[in-house]
Amino acid sequence: KPASEFTVKGGEKVNIQIEGIEAGATITWDLVVGGWDLDYSVEFIPNAQDSYTVLVEKSKKMRPSEEAVHNSFLAREPGKLVLSVVAVALKKRKVAAYRY
C-alpha cells in the first residue's frame, strides 16, 4: 500500500486508526518523519468491551535523521490499531508519512 502523508501542528496529537483487524491477522506498519522530532506510540484496542487495550509500543522519540519505524503486531482478537503521533515542539509543523 502506498504511504499516506499527514501534517502535525506544534503541540498537536494525531491518532491514526487502522480498523477492521481480524483475529489472527498480522498488521505491519512503517512510520517516517521529516523535518522535526515527533513522539509516537502504538496500541491495539480490541472490539470486545471486556478485553484490555494492549500497549504495542510505548512512547518513543523519532528524529528525522532516523530510519523509518517498521513494526508488526499479531492480533489475537478483532480490533483496531492506533498509531499516536505528537509534535512536541510548539509553533512548528511537522510532516510524517505512514503505510500499513
Image (cartoon, rainbow, N blue to C red):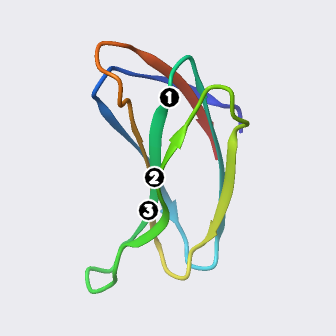
Work out whether 77 lies above or below 43: below
Work out whether 77 lies above or below 8: below
- The x, y position of residue 2, in whole percent, is 70, 32
Mark 2 crowdedness (10 Å alpha carbons): few <14, some 14-19, many ≥20: some
Structural distance between the alpha carbons of marks 3 and 2? 7 Å
Q: Earlier in the sequence, mark 1 or mark 3?
A: 1
Element class at badge 3? strand
- In-front residue for pair 90/75: 90
The residue that disc 1 covers is 37
Comparing labels 1 and 3, the label whose residue is closer to the camera:
1
- The x, y position of residue 33, in whole percent, is 58, 28
Work out whether 69 lies above or below 8: below
Cβ–Cβ under 8 Å for marks 1 and 3: no
Mark 3 crowdedness (10 Å alpha carbons): few <14, some 14-19, many ≥20: some
Mark 1 crowdedness (10 Å alpha carbons): few <14, some 14-19, many ≥20: some
Q: How many marks?
A: 3
Q: Which residue is drawn at the image coordinates 73% and 36% (left, top)? A: 67
The residue that disc 3 covers is 43
Q: Which residue is drawn at the image coordinates 64% and 47% (left, top)? A: 100
- The x, y position of residue 30, in whole percent, is 66, 44
Residue 9 visible (yes or no): yes
Element class at badge 2? strand
Comparing labels 3 and 2, the label whose residue is closer to the camera:
2
Cβ–Cβ under 8 Å for marks 3 and 2: yes
